Amino acid sequence: MNVRDLDLARRMAAGDEVAFDELFDRSFPALYRFAMARMNRDADGAEEVVQAALVKATSKIATFRGEASLLTWLCTFCRHEISSFYERAGRGRPTTELVEEVPEIKAALESLPALAGDDPGTSLQRKEIARLVHVTLDRLPGRYADALEWKYIEGLPVREIAARLALTPKAAESLLTRAREAFRDGFSALQAV
Amino acid sequence: MNDRDRDDSTTTTLPEISDEKIAGLLRLTGPRPAVPADRSSRVKAAVRAHWRDEVAGRSRRKTLWTAAALAAAVTVAIALGLARWWRPGGPPPAAIAARVEVGSATARTGEAVRSGSELKTSGADRLAIRLAAGHSVRLDVDTRVQVLSPRAVALYEGAVYVDSGGPDPLHAPGGGSIEIRTPAGEVHEMGTQFEVRIIDAAVRVRVREGTVSMDLPTGGLEVQAGRELEVDAAGRAHRGDVPTSGAHWEWIGAVAPMMEIEGRTLREFLDWFGRERGVEIRFAGAEPAASASNIRLNGSIDGMTLDQALESVLLTCRMGHRIDGNAILVEPLAGPRGSP
């Protein structure tokens, strides 16, 4: 049960503007990337389907039960809107093969931990790995993904991350630990596809 | 490991992916692609507007339920039907969903209409917009709509007329069919011209060309050209005939965006006029028909009514016209050439 997501959905259903901002700010970038990856990088199309998905999801927010995460729930709307988008246009959906959805590519995924080391692998693999890492980050709860990016990509010290999150340095360290664990779990789950 | 890394207290090492490998993986792949701020803010505004309406709609529905408890069961059923539709949760796609073609007191010609925008006309003005999908949508007086997307419009009050451009590939829009959402159901066009009007609690669909389908809670119904379908508040459907031209459609011409005739042939102009008026264009012989395809027009008909435009254009081409039933007969003018 995703208690935090369920609480967010309930607050949104009750008309809480802060909850709306939180849900949108948290989910829109992930949904947009989700749609872009499935629509041949069609930015206008992605904007259209994500808006449609969010509109429909907000209409049904009171039915969210928290069995899956809110983002997973929203992605089902997004998937449906992508299909409708191509049906309306009289075109078939692009046959984008996404690693996390195609079991045949599982073998390539098994090399991911090794590729994370010194051997960067081929550029195609790296692109796919990058996308998978980003998918994993998008699925992390709360500010975990931001914290990991600040730490490992921007190279910020923990005290700076703590300041950005309005936490004590110790609490920020703890959050980073949990973020790494969540990332590890999420990424492992993708590998297990 | 640099100084900054030493600030971190890495405590857990699992066999599959170590903390160091997580760090390496993140550095290797870089940050997640940023989402353009303008897209984010546009979508947020549209979704927020819809969400606020939803929340307000739920409050209204609660009130409706309280009142319905005192009413007969049939009233409850109607209220539920309305509540189901109340604010359509439709897909509002691209940023700019339409542009105003013929403005009014509240919307300027050329103005962009974004997804989720509401448009209203008063008792004294009408409005024409062109959806980004290519369809012309005209709003009659006292009409209120919400442009949900380049392919969907919700009609709350009054009447809209839709021209999809017809089967001619030169005029057909590229974005597929569109739908008009009403309290009674959704109306889908299939290469058509049609009107959807809310009359009290009923919704009436009149088709001038082609076919439309209407999705009702009880199933889909098709309406062919020259026919009308009225769905009353109880969801009952009534069918009837309607002429495809004449007084019923008069208001459409009053808000028709004028064709840009510069460089176009007389034939193209006449085809456009015929489509706007819902009449067939005929020629009094092969010669005027051939001339119509060869004559190229200059100037502009902006500011004219449809009939004034027809008179003026034909006159400059030394032609006139007669009304012949549901057709306009175009014929050469007798006598010496007059000055246009």
Image (tube, coloured by chain):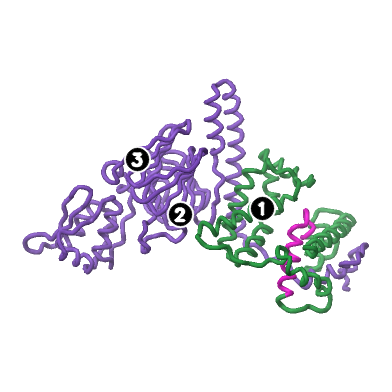
Chain colours: A green, B purple
Q: Which residue is mark 3?
A: B124
Q: Amino acid at mark 3?
A: Ala
Give amino acid for label 2. Answer: Ser
Do the numbered discs 2 and 3 sit on residues whose CB atoms are within 8 Å?
Answer: no
Q: Amino acid at mark 1?
A: Thr
Q: Secondary structure at mark 3?
A: loop
Give the quadrant of the C terminus of chain A: bottom right
> Can you tell which mark lies on residue B259?
none
Front-lying residue, B66 or B282: B282
Query: What whole-number distance in Å separates the C-alpha atoms at marks 1 and 3?
Result: 45 Å
Identify the main secondary structure in magenta.
helix
Identify the disc placed on residue A76. 1
Protein chain holding label 1? A
Query: Circle 2 is placed at which residue position?
Result: B177
Quarter-wise, where is residue B331 in the image? bottom left
Which element is circle 2 on?
loop
Q: Identify the chain of the residue marked 2, using the numbered disc in the image.
A: B
- The subunit letter for the residue under badge 3 reads B
